[in-house]
Amino acid sequence: MIKFAGNERVRKKIPRSYPRIDLSSTIFDQKDLRWLGEAWDLLDQHGFSFGIQVHNSASDEELAMAANSGFMLSFHLPVQGRYMLNFAAEDTSKSWDIIKEQYELMEQYSVCRTVFHGFLMTDKDICAFGHGKSYYDCMNAARRIELLRSPVSNFVRDFTNTDEFLMRRERLKENLERLRFEYGEYHWCIENDFPAITSGMLRGSDMAYLKHELCFDTGHMWATSKMLDLDFYEELNTALESECVEMIHLHASKYTFDMPHDQWGDGHLPLTYPNSAIDLKKVVQMCKNAGVGHFVLECGTTQLEDIKLFLRYYFED
């Protein structure tokens, strides 16, 4: 059980390992990973630790490969879980069961930092995607046409001024406070959502409101900025000014604002993708200046050149 010392949570003594770059465990789909050793040496020369973030869709084999890689691990919850977390639901008992399971798994694999999605505009239990089920297979079980841009769209409209949204956001904030109290020796970053179906964690201001550890996903906020007519860099700055952003999911996007809404999708393209619509150097510099130390290159096709490009963005003025 966590104890409080003033307003600070007392954490287990974990060796300082930041700044840090993690790669998604989805890279283990690559046939040739001999470049990882060179990447590790390169990052070490520049003062970075190197890790693997085990994705929530990871198979038994993928988890085992990550665990046997020799790199530090972080988790994208729920690892091998059956259901998505939703701390905005009326009944959160299933989410708390998942947290207990994940905590035990974190202990087993010496994981001290996690990231998760935890805000859905539904009270239904939603299966976790992966393991043969796609994101939309799972999320469509809670499809609510009144939250979408049109009856045939997968993308949300702006419902962030509704009484239901505000009520669920407050419920989420209270549950995150409980999470910090009961399991606060570890880091549990909540991530902004891809703006589809019933996702609720959308704006930088909503992230900052929680006063909880955050993961800012570039591709998700890029899409949200299109759907809700926001300025992406202002949303990033709002989140960073909260001083709660501990992790960045960094990836390129091919989607431009002149494209129709329903032609959009997620990013998850490597940093070296030509002509990324997101100014990734600006993002990296903003995060560096705000003191963010944990960057996750969340793309299964990441290569050594992407890491070199990140370091160039990080150290150039």
Image (spheres, rainbow, N blue to C red):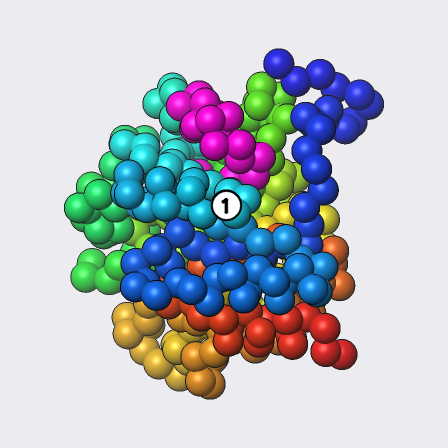
The N terminus lies in quadrant: top right
Q: Secondary structure at mark 1?
A: loop
Residue reaching furthest to the top: 1
Identify the residue shown where x is 46% and y is 26%.
Answer: 108
Which residue has dot 1 on it?
70
Q: Is residue 105 left or right of residue 145?
A: right
Q: Where residue 207 appears, x then y in whole percent?
A: 58, 48
Q: Is residue 276 left or right of residue 207?
A: left
Q: 54 and 116: which one is in front? A: 54
The C terminus lies in quadrant: bottom right
Q: Identify the magenta region.
A: 100-120
Q: Is residue 225 left or right of residue 243?
A: left
Q: Is residue 131 above or below residue 202?
A: above
Q: 255 and 120: which one is in front? A: 255
Q: Is residue 127 above or below residue 194?
A: above
Identify the residue shown where x is 32% and y is 33%.
Answer: 81
Q: Is residue 195 above or below residue 253?
A: above
Amino acid type, mark 1: Gly
